[in-house]
Image (cartoon, rainbow, N blue to C red):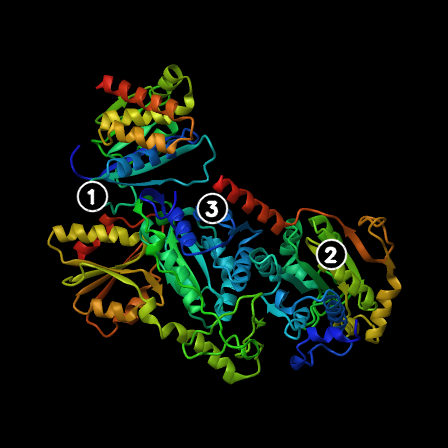
Amino acid sequence: MNSGCNMQFLQGNEACALGAIEAGVRFFGGYPITPATEIAEVMARELPKLGGVFVQFEDEIASIGAVIGASVAGTKAMTATSGPGFSLKQENLGYAIHVQIPCVVVNVMRGGPSTGLPTLPSQSDVMQARWGTHGDHPIIALAPYSVRECFDLTVRAVNLSERFRIPVIVLSDAIIGHVREKVVLPKREELTLVERKKPTVDPEDYKPFEDDGTGIPPMANLGEDYLFHITSNNYDDEGFPATNDHDIAGRRIKSLYNKIERYRDEIDDVDLFMVEDAEIIIVAYGSTARSARRAVMMAREEGIKAGLFRLKTIWPFPYDHLKAAAESANHLLLAEMNMSQLDSEVRSATHDLETKLHGLHQSNGMLITPYQIYDSLKGLV
Amino acid sequence: MNNKEYQVRLSGFGGQGIILAGIILGEAVSLYENRFAVQFQSYGPEARGGASRAEVVISDEEIDLLELIEPDVFLALSQQAFDKYIGDAHEKALVIVDPDYVTNAPLSSRKVFAVPVSRIAREQIGKTIVINMVALGALAAITGLVGIDALKKAVSARVPPGTEKINLKAVLAGYESAREMN
Amino acid sequence: MKRNSYKKYLRTHKLPHIWCPGCGHGIILGAALRAMDELELDPYKTVAVTAIGCSARTNAIMNCNTIQTTHGRSLTFASGIKMARPDLTVLLFVGDGDGAAIGGNHLIHAARRNVDLTTILLNNSIYGMTGGQYSPLTPYQKTASTSPYGNLEQDFDVCKLADAAGASYVARGIAHDPRHLSRLIRGGIEHKGFSFIEGISQCPTYYGRRNKFSSPLEIMRWVKERSVRVKPETYNFSQDMDGAIPVGLLSHRNLPEFTDEYRKLVEQLQKGDNA
């Protein structure tokens, strides 16, 4: 099992780990949890061979804490978990968003709440990925729908995280994480890798959080030419606490949002399948989108003009893309393995269109099958 | 069998190597016949010895079916697995059982192949651990879903180094015994 | 050593500090700064990690790399830093609630893993930043805002905990004797492995006032009078101290250090690949 070689029959979680390694991740903080554990197991085996560090920590909190520490020290770092662990990581995830430390958190979703359905598939952490940690904050979350995409979107997650100094969530699910299928992974030289932007100013002039005009402050690594301070409190451009200055506080939060909004063209990522002439468009992501693609083909064979709008980037939600795609359709069918978490996002994207929104939601630990979606499509004709 | 996608469910005791058999079947089809397969498995809290299953969908085209709907082929190497997983196998499904372990198989309208895979493993190979390989060989012969050459290549590539010979012998023993049955 | 030369490890433009008058934390920080100065630590290669609470206020005023993290989690961040960059010197300043309550599990496991970190626990027997609630190091029957009728819980011997968990250097000093504490901290930094130093501080504002100490000095004297110097050769953590506080280097052993072990693994695997 390795990247850059010919055809392989790989599991989604294995592809995710290989993607991380190819993207340059050299620190993995792990904690065992099904259905994500294979990612840690591959990292435990492969990272030390590459001089990277794998450590299994005492809990989910420690694993992300160490990941953030390693990232501040200049190493691309990642952790992987599932719902219960994702809940535990929220505190430090918020810290990393706040102090703008790149890292990747993979959540292989299973049914909740609590330990819920160990370990049946689900997509019910979509809103937790968006708003799981407290306070106003942006986030980036990507959803792979195939083994190959587990690789590709993990590489992309690492790149986006380094580029925008923000944690990126890979929202996989128990189906995609565990399914094995044939893949041909790209060779190393075919990949574009992003490295974090480093400061070039004189050390005495370095202000770790000063906007250099791009909205993304250059980041020094520990132990190099710059001294710096990081705080969990609201901070000024020099990185020191600024909790009594409302102007600085407001500006800081806005700057966190703006650095993402400003670069939506780099972050948004959707896949359109037969939507051009579609009268009914399915909105789906992850494993459900696989079923949806099949349902579209089944429907097309029957003469039903169906299409699929697939979210590869879930957060920030690609409102404009959805609106553009939905403009000429009569119906939208949102299919998710949850109790309709993205409903309000889809509504807000299409609120001034005539398109009617329907939902196909299932939260019982079972994949929504192509036949279920096909039946829903037929019901809309 | 014609050009649709085939849904295969392999089941048995945990510890019989059912999941490995599923992976090898998927690899044989997708890597050595250049067709398509997806494989998935049940992850329960079941301890070793409980019922275990692995599922494979096989097709000549890309597959978007990530969960088994209705098995076309159902293999059961234990009564518990048979009882637990036969449920949604459709009426025309091919059913392969080990008659030494699956003694109660009420299958009026289904076609049942009784292949004593554990006995073959024990008597012809001398190791019950290769029961999964015998079963794969038998499945290949009965269903024609995978060629024996591809299966042999996949087995050689996947099993621990040094055990290729005995595993290949087991696959062939299963294959031959099931061919004789036809 | 020039008098006050340790001040180069202070970001003097970030002073004054925000501790209450009479607080012991500044004394303990001073002891740590003197140890850093004696060892001539390169600020660029030194990282001080804190979390939340009064203990965390050591951080922004230190002139080296300083990282203030989430409550109780400083050891996890510090572990990641040290594992990614074993060449850096990593010091931690944690509090008694921070290090022994919310961060207690991380303390146990960082000690067990024997990562080369120097952890200084500033023990003022109270949650000061939030206004004086009892912590795992508030003694039995002492009063706090959340134990108004006296603390019903037994307090930790946090050094015994660290030792039992596998810390390879364990010491206790007191704010009343900063030179001694400084030597203990210096020993901890020099030691290769997980070093744990409890520094007994005082909180006159909350702990002192609620427990009928009339001044900061009175708390310091109370601690001083009960402290007994011990040596690692003769001290054992189970011995009955009859209310006395054992002070000094309590235990010291050479155990495989995590980042060393990891480096050896990497070398072995990479050699195997080349062969």
Decide which of A217, C20 is in the foreground and name it. Answer: A217
Tell me the crowding category of disc 1: few under 14, some 14 to 19, or many 20 or more residues within 10 angstroms, Cα based.
few
Q: What residue type is labelled 1?
A: Glu
State which mark lies toward you, 2 or 3.
3
Q: What residue type is labelled 2?
A: Val
Q: Which mark is residue A46?
A: 3
Tell me the crowding category of disc 2: few under 14, some 14 to 19, or many 20 or more residues within 10 angstroms, Cα based.
many
Q: Mark 1 lies on which chain?
A: B
Q: Residue C158 carries which label?
A: 2
> From this viewpoint, which residue is outermost toward the left?
A303
Q: In which quarter of the image is residue C247?
A: bottom right
> From this viewpoint, which residue is outermost toward the front?
C275
Residue position marked by numbered label 1 in the rendering: B61
> Tag 1, which secondary structure?
loop
Q: Is residue B150 left or right of residue A231?
A: left
> Tag 2, which secondary structure?
helix
Tell me the crowding category of disc 3: few under 14, some 14 to 19, or many 20 or more residues within 10 angstroms, Cα based.
many
Q: Do labels 2 and 3 share a chain?
A: no
